[in-house]
């Protein structure tokens, strides 16, 4: 049920059978959500954290006029709000972008993990640090990268993250998002996203259609985006 989450952890560090058992035992409930559903609302008091099993979710903040900025995409295997364990409520909303299946992990179970499995607790702390690194990289994109480079960088990031959980390779991956949702990720208008996708296609780098990203030249795409996967910390070592 949570094999992709286990794969995400094992890509960064060793995981004992006792630690894996503790993770599996921490799941209290599995839920199915429809797309375009806000499942966690800003300031809502939380007693559990949500682990995404299947689908795509995002964190976002919006303005009173309805304009929305997505601050991070979540893929299968991600905790979408592990930070709520210490914060107890969020300053942002979390919504589904596609049909999703999630596992709920009560905070009391996470408390037990911190007390009984200190190495696993460090590993989860490490995952929240990666989330912060992703936010910094997205901030750089929003502030300094060109429109085309923003989209290229997002595709490069997702390719790495989805590879970790067995959902991508050097040829591409499924991405059932709309151009409007890509616009909300990149701080662009839907028109600019369309033009950027067209430019990437004409340059022979990416084809995005029918909810799939076809990578024609991953190396050149990374060069265009100035993509360095270091911030994703995909290096296996003891944490």
Image (cartoon, helix red, strand yellow):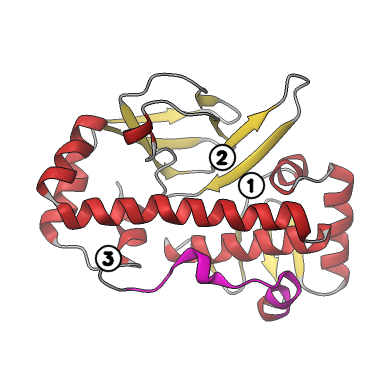
Locate residue 82: give its quadrant.
top left
How far across and how far down the image is residue 210, in percent? 71, 52
Q: Which residue is mark 2?
A: 58
| Element marked by disc 1 | loop
Where are the magenta residues, as a range? 220-236
Q: Which residue is mark 3?
A: 239
Given this view, does label 1 or label 3 mark the residue nearer the observer? 3
Left or right for 90, reference 71: left
**Looking at the image, is mark 3 or mark 2 nearer the viewer?**
3
| CB within 8 Å, label 3 to label 2 | no
* Picture quadrant of residue 155: bottom right
- Is residue 77 visible to the viewer in this orientation of the structure? no
Cα distance, mark 1 to mark 2? 13 Å
What label does residue 198 carry, if any? none
Q: CA distance from mark 1 to mark 3?
A: 34 Å
Q: Which residue is drawn at the image coordinates 44% and 40% (left, top)?
A: 80
What residue is at 59 percent from the left and 73 percent from the top? 228
- Residue 112: image x %, image y %? 14, 39
Residue behind mark 1: 176
Q: Is residue 91 left or right of residue 24?
A: right
Say which label, 1 or 2, has the lower sequence index.
2
Residue 224 on the magenta span: yes
> 224 above or below 33?
below
């Amino acid at each position: 049920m949570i094999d992709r989450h286990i794969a995400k952890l094992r890509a960064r560090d060793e995981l004992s059978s006792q630690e894996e058992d503790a993770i599996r035992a921490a799941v209290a409930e599995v839920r199915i959500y429809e797309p375009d559903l806000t499942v966690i609302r800003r300031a809502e008091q939380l007693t559990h954290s949500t682990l995404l099993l299947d689908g795509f979710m995002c964190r976002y903040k919006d303005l009173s006029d309805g304009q929305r900025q997505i601050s991070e995409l979540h893929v299968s295997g991600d905790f979408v709000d592990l930070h709520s364990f210490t914060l107890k409520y969020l300053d942002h909303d979390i919504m589904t972008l596609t049909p999703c299946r999630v596992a709920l992990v009560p905070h009391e179970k996470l408390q037990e993990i911190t007390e009984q499995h200190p190495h696993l607790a460090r590993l989860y702390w490490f995952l929240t640090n990666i989330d912060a690194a992703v936010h910094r990289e997205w901030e750089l994109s929003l502030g300094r990268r060109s429109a085309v480079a923003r989209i290229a960088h997002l595709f490069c990031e997702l390719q790495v993250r989805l590879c970790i959980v067995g959902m991508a390779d050097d040829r591409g991956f499924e991405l059932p998002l709309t151009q409007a949702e890509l616009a909300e990720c990149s701080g662009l208008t839907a028109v600019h996203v369309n033009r950027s996708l067209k430019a990437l296609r004409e340059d022979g780098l990416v084809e995005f259609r029918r909810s799939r990203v076809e990578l024609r030249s991953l190396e050149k795409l990374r060069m265009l985006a100035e993509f360095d996967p270091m911030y994703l910390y995909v290096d296996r070592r003891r944490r």
